[in-house]
Amino acid sequence: MSNNDVSTRNGHGNGISRNGNGNGGRNGNGNGKGNSLSRAANAMPPLAEVLRKRRIMLTGATGFLGKVLLYLLLRHHPEIERIFLLIRGDRRSSLNRFRREILDSPAMAPLREHLGARFDGYVEEKVAIVAGDITEPDLITDTADTLGHDKLDALIHCAGLVNFEASLEKAIAINTVGVANVIEFCRKRGAALLHVSTCYAAGGADGHRFEDDVPVDWCPSGRRNFNSRREIRDALAAVDRVEAESHDQARQAELRAAGANENADTGEARDHVLEAMRKRWVEERLKEIGRDRAKSWGWPNTYSYTKSLGEQLVFAARDSIVATVVRPSIIESALSDPLPGWNQGVNTSAPLTYLAGQGYRFYPAKGELVLDIVPVDLAAQAMIPVLGALLLKRHQPIYQLCTSDRNPLPMRRLVELTGLSNRRENRKRGGPMGKLAPHLEAVVVSQSTYELVSETLPKLLKHGSALAKTLMGGESIPARKIAQQVDSLTENAELARSLVEVYRPYIQELVYTFHGNNIRALYKTLTPADVERHPYSPEKIISFRSSTSIREAGRARPSATRRCSRCSIAPPKNTARSPRSKRANPPVSARRSAIVNCATPRIAPVFCSAFAGSSTATVYC
C-alpha cells in the first residue's frame, strides 16, 4: 500500500497523523448520553416519518451486513429520498461492482421479485453510486461528486476488514484510519454517523460487558497510560519502519538470495520476482507485528485491536458530530431476510464450521463456553430503528446486538448444529458417506485429546502410507490412492491446527456475556407496525438451546412428518416431541410458529426461530 493509502500522515484532517496531536474531545457532549434515558421512554414516531426525504450514505454495501441492510432499506422504506453507496474504485469500476456484487446478488432477488418490472427504475431512483475509498482523506475519489453540496443526513459505516490475521498495515488503514476519515467527512458534511463495530472489541476484558461503559483511551489490559491516538500513530510508524527495512540493502540481498532458484531469465523478470518477495516479506512481518502489538495491550488479534481503536475515535469525536456505535457480535446466516440461511463468503466463525464439513471431527473447545452469534438480518433490522433514533438525537452511545445475555449458544451446541447440517448434506449426496456421516460428526474434546489427534494421528497415517507402498509397491494404484488420501487428511489437519490457533481465545479462553439492554429499550418505544416490520427477537432463536430444553419450555414442535417442499427432507427427529415427554402437544392455537431453516450453507451453522402470532409450522429448505 502506498503512502497515500494511509491518510493524514502529516498532521492534517482527522488528527491521527504520525505527527499530529488529534482533535477529538474525550468526554464530548454526550450526544444522547445524558438525559437520553428519559427521552427514550417517550414513543418514537413512525420510522417512515423519521426517514422521509432523508439522504443516507452507506459504506460497505458490497459486504455481508451492508448488503442486507441496503435490501431492507429499499424494501421497507421507499420514503428515503436517496441512498448513496460509497464503493471502492473509479466511476466505471464502482458501478460495475454495484451491478455485479449487489444487484445480481441473491440478496436482491426478493426485492426484484416483489417489484417486478419496476425494479430497475426504483433502484435508479433511490440509489446513487459514489466512487471512493475510506482510506482516502476525503472518501470520494470521483471528481464528479455525485453528492454535490446538498445536505447529507447520516452516514452508516459498515465497511471494515473482517480478518483476524490481516497485516497491521491493512487492518489499521481500513478499521482505524478509515474510521477517522469517515468522522472527518461527517464533520464537514454535518452528517450523523452510525458506526458498526463489534462486541469483540472488548478483547481480553471478558466477563459481563455492558453498554454504559464507553471506552476512550482504553485497552483490555487496563493500563492507565494507554492513549488511543498515540497508539495509532505508533502503529503507523511501525508500518513505515517495516516498509523502509524491506528496501534496506542487507534485506534486499537476503531476498535476492532466497529467490535465486526462481525461474527468471531476464533482469526485468528478476526484479519482478524480487518485488513480489519483498511484498510477501512485508505482509508476513506486519502480521507478526500486528499480533504482538495487539496482545501487548490485551487484544487477542489485529482485528479486535484495530476495531476497538476505530470505535474509540468515534466516542472521542462526540463533541463535534452526532454519533452512535452499533456492536453486533458474530454475524452469521440469515433467519429469513433476504433469504432463509443466506450467507456470503467464509467469514468470522465460518472457518470452524467449514472444517467440520471437510471431515474434521475434533474441536478443542470448552463445551459450555458461549460463542455469541447473531443472524445477519436481525442485526440489519435493528440498525434501522437505531438510525431513526440517531436522526432524532434520541440515541444511546452504544447498541450491542447480541444473544449471550438472553439466549446463549454454547460451543457444544454449535458443534452439534454443525454436525446436523453436515449429516443432512451427506444424506442428500447418498452413498457410503450418507450412512457413515452420523458416526463421523464433529465433537468437542479436551486440549490433550486434540493435540494427540492433530499431531500423532497424521504421523501414524504417514507411516501407514509408507508401509502400504512397501507392501504393495510404490507405483501400485491402491498405494497411490492411500497416499493421496493421507496427504489430503494431513493437509486438512494442518489447516485445522492453524485455524484453531486463530480462534483459540474465543473457543477456550475468553468467556463473554454481552448485554443488549439499549436495543431492547429502543424497541419498546417503536410503533407496533415498526416492530413487526423490523423484527429483532434473538431470544426466540430456538436452535441455540438444546432440543430437550426447547421441548420442556413448550416451544414449537413441527410435526416430524412435515417435509421440506424443496428438498423433501423431514426435519431432524429432535425437533419433534420428545419420546421421554408424556405431555400431550398443546392445541394448535397455543403453538408458536416455527421456522426450521434446512438450507443454511454447509459452512454456516443451522438456525431456526420461533415467532408468536401464527398457528402454522413452516419448514424451509
Image (cartoon, helix red, strand yellow):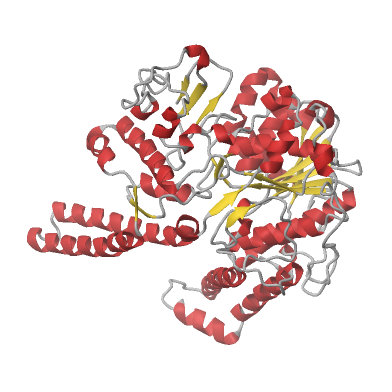
Q: Nearer the viewer, residue 103 or 198?
A: 198
Q: Nearer the viewer, residue 274 or 121?
A: 121
Asked whether residue 99 appears in the rendered view, the answer is: no
In the picture as drawn, the residue positioned furthest to the front comes out as 582
In the picture as drawn, the residue positioned furthest to the bottom comes out as 250
Q: Quadrant of residue 308?
A: bottom right
Pinpoint residue 216: horizontal percent, then vertical percent. 75, 62
Picture quarter with the C terminus: top left
Pinpoint residue 128: horizontal percent, then vertical percent. 77, 37
Pinpoint residue 441: horizontal percent, then vertical percent. 31, 43
Q: How many marks?
A: 0
Pinpoint residue 336: horizontal percent, then vertical percent. 56, 29
Q: Quadrant of residue 581?
A: top left
Task: Classify 421 as above or below 4.
Answer: above
Q: Quadrant of residue 23?
A: bottom right
- Residue at (74% x, 25% y) in the render: 122
Q: Nearer the viewer, residue 405 or 230?
A: 405
Task: Classify 479 as above or below 527.
Answer: below
In the picture as drawn, the residue positioned furthest to the left comes out as 471
Asked whether residue 272 appears in the rendered view, the answer is: yes
Picture quarter with the N terminus: bottom right
Task: Classify 360 as above or below 228.
Answer: above
- Residue at (74% x, 66% y) in the render: 217
- Residue at (60% x, 61% y) in the render: 205
